[in-house]
Image (spheres, rainbow, N blue to C red):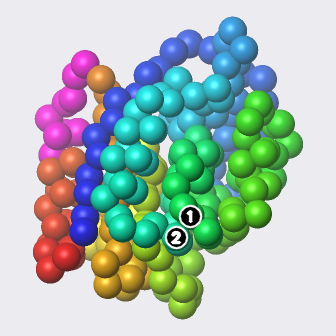
Amino acid sequence: VFLIMVSFLKIRDTQIVAIKQTAAGEFSVKKEKGQHTIFFDSLPVFSAPSANKELIENVVHDALIMHPDPQSVLLIGFDPGYIQEILKHPVTHLTFLSGVPEFDQFLKDLNLPGVNSVLSDSRVFLARQDPRFFLQHNSKLFDVVLLADTSQMSLLSNRLFTREFFEKVHRSLYENGMFVLDVTVPRHYQSNVQKQIIAMICKTAISVFKHR
């Protein structure tokens, strides 16, 4: 089963309070009125408390209730808000894979409200590898793979929207497994380029998951 969820991102002006350089790119943290927003190479990836909690809830719950027994989940992305919602389901093992090895520790050091508690949950495993490498060498199968990466146009993330990567996801799913793709776009306006990108992602995913 392949699902694509389209979410809408809220962006607001904030003040930089932390910066972290990594081999993959730069993280920056901006704060406004008690809310922290984390950016990766100037693209917002999540906020705490979440500005998009309702959207995350809709994506996670609408997807997971369609699986009869989602015990093993792979979450690819930066936002730990998805973890909190996924763990409300009968999940026994959740692998959190950001794709940037330094990100997990950076996130813990920020000590954002509610974040460290979900990262330290006994059901959560933090994988510090490139998603393509992880899927290529991982022998474990998953009931659900959720790709919650909001930056399809970044150099780091666009590799996750290729046929090659979708085929790796396909091989990592149980027979009745689900691949859920959460695509975030501006709320009020989508350019022709953005529409073309979404269309290409859908066409590519359907070509891989056409028999599911």
Span colored in magenta: 188-196
Residue that mark 2 sits on:
71
- The amino acid type, in three-letter code, at marker 2 is Gln
Name the spot of residue 60 as percent of width and height, x first. 43, 48
- Label 1 crowding class (10 Å Cα cut-off): few <14, some 14-19, many 20+? some
Q: Is 24 situated left or right of 183 in this image?
A: right
Q: Is 26 situated left or right of 61 in this image?
A: right
> Can you say whether 96 is above or below 53 in the image?
below
The local secondary structure at tag 2 comes to loop
Name the spot of residue 189 as percent of width and height, x first. 22, 22
Q: Earlier in the sequence, mark 1 or mark 2?
A: 2
The local secondary structure at tag 1 comes to loop
Q: Is residue 17 visible?
A: yes
Q: Quadrant of the N terminus?
A: bottom left
- Tell me if residue 122 is in the magenta stretch: no
Q: Residue furthest top?
A: 33
Residue at point 14%, 62% (across, down)? 203
Residue at point 14%, 80% (across, down)? 211
Given contact means CB atoms under 8 Å apart, are the residues at marks 1 and 2 in contact? Answer: yes
Say which quarter of the image contains residue 185.
top left
> Can you say whether 29 is above or below 87 in the image?
above
- The amino acid type, in three-letter code, at marker 1 is Val
Say which quarter of the image contains residue 125.
bottom right
Residue that mark 1 sits on:
91
Q: Is 9 situated left or right of 103 in this image?
A: left
Q: Is 212 situated left or right of 181 in this image?
A: left
Q: Quadrant of the C terminus?
A: bottom left
Q: Is residue 168 visible?
A: no
Name the spot of residue 93 as percent of width and height, x first. 62, 69
Distance, label 1 to label 2, CA atoms, is: 4 Å
Name the spot of residue 23 as percent of width and height, x first. 69, 58
